[in-house]
Amino acid sequence: MPFVLDCSVALAWVFPDEATAALDALCDSLIEDNALAPAIWPLEITNALLAAQRRGRITAEELQDIVAKLRVLSIEVDQETGEQAFTRILALAQKHNLTSYDAAYLELALHQELPLATLDRQLQAACQLENVTVLP
């Protein structure tokens, strides 16, 4: 089943110390299905990986390996995120006290009527209030 993917889950896929069986199964599901992510997703991933490299968690070579692994996954980046920024995303951010980034994931899940894969507790709580299924 397709789902909306947030940064926290994708990063857990690539950092072994954050892996769980449920997260691994979700990643494996991309062999047959696809995930959707708002247009901010690649920027969030890039920023998190750069921060990990700067803190010495990963090397520059490992960063490039991670990027290569993420690029082959069946993840479709939604190109309409920006069009919703000042309307639905803003409204969701205000309603649930979310960052605009997190509200973008929630908006995409609502708009596409898909579950949202996130490890973010505040975003999970907003999903519950909006009747969006949370994965894993």
Image: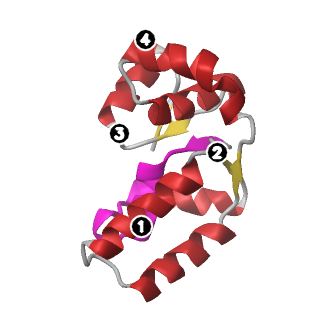
Q: What amino acid is labelled 4 in the image?
A: Lys
On residue 39, the disc is: 2
Q: What amino acid is labelled 1 in the image?
A: Leu
Q: Which of marks 3 and 4 is nearer the N terminus?
A: 4
Residue 87 falls in image quadrant: top right
For disc 3, the neighbor class at 10 Å (few under 14, some 14 to 19, many from 20) is few
Tell me if residue 97 can be seen.
yes
Q: Give the range drawn in magenta.
A: 3-23
Viewer-side label of 3, 4: 4
Viewer-side label of 3, 2: 2
Viewer-side label of 3, 1: 1
For disc 1, the neighbor class at 10 Å (few under 14, some 14 to 19, many from 20) is many
Residue visible at 37% across and 43% down? Answer: 119
Residue tagged by mark 1? Answer: 49
- Residue sticking out furthest to the bottom: 61
Q: Earlier in the sequence, mark 4 or mark 1?
A: 1
Residue visible at 45% across and 88% down? Answer: 61
Task: Answer whether labels 3 and 4 touch (C-beta < 8 Å).
Answer: no
Residue tagged by mark 3? Answer: 120
Q: Which of marks 3 and 2 is nearer the N terminus?
A: 2
Question: Marks 4/1: CA distance?
Answer: 30 Å
